[in-house]
Image (cartoon, rainbow, N blue to C red):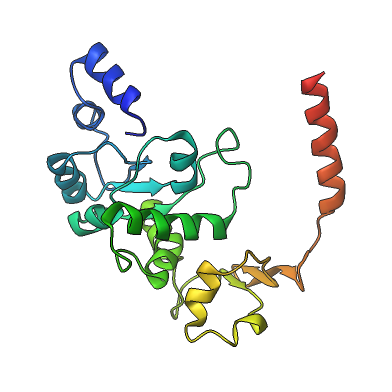
Amino acid sequence: CETAEEQQHCLDRFGMRPVEMLDQWGWVDNDVWLAHGIHIDDSEMQRLGAAGTGIAHCPSSNARLGAGMCRVTDLLAAGCPVGLGVDGVASNEVGGLFPELRQALYTARLRELRPDALMPDQVIELATHGGAQCLGLENVGHLALGQQADLAIWPGNDLGDMADALAGLVMGPDRRARHVLVGGKPVVTDGEVLGFDLASAHRNLASRAQELWD
């Protein structure tokens, strides 16, 4: 469901659209999520929503490849869980949270031609609870008693001039997390990754990449 070419390939080879084919294979269910979810018609959207099938929205990759624009608000209205993804390094070298938050926001507004199509709090919801829903995880994705304490804390001292700090966080400049906890355990403190030599990993990656290029 990513590109028009993929759609046509399925029609030519199997005589059906991708969602219909997946449905016949038993892959339309609430323990399944589909990447991109762009070329989906209204009836397919209702089928996916009724089944609780999730969609991983990858707006930056979609824009880079000219694949199309995901109908995020329609998918949500149909009952589909929608999370945010980055696709992969072949079409998204950055793979960062903030570029996807902004791109998801802007893509929805551009597609629907209205500035309130998707709001900052809604894209945060996609990136957190929406992703957890797609993965079938009930103990992560939002802050509540009994949930796993997966927390990321960003500096916000430069957002004081903004009436809506959340909008500033989403639409402002990219920033590195100051603190990150996974299951309540600190893994990043004051911007430094704990127990891992990030600089060494970067050097190792560059060396291995050079071997492939050579």
x, y percent for residue 114: 28, 63
x, y percent for residue 152: 60, 70
Question: Looking at the picture, does residue 146 appear above or below residue 182?
Answer: below
Question: Looking at the picture, does residue 65 appear above or below residue 11?
Answer: below
Front residue of 111/24: it is 111
x, y percent for residue 133: 36, 57
Residue ID at (63%, 64%): 174
Would residue 123 be found to the left or right of residue 14 on screen? right
Residue farthest along the top direction in this orientation: 13
Residue ID at (50%, 41%): 87
Q: In which quarter of the image is residue 35?
A: top left
Would residue 173 be found to the left or right of residue 108 on screen? right
- How many badges with numbers are in the image? 0
Please state, as top left, top right, bottom left or bottom right, where the C terminus lies in the image.
top right
Residue ID at (53%, 84%): 162
Q: In which quarter of the image is residue 110?
A: bottom left
x, y percent for residue 160: 60, 87
Front residue of 8/77: it is 8
Please state, as top left, top right, bottom left or bottom right, where the N terminus lies in the image.
top left
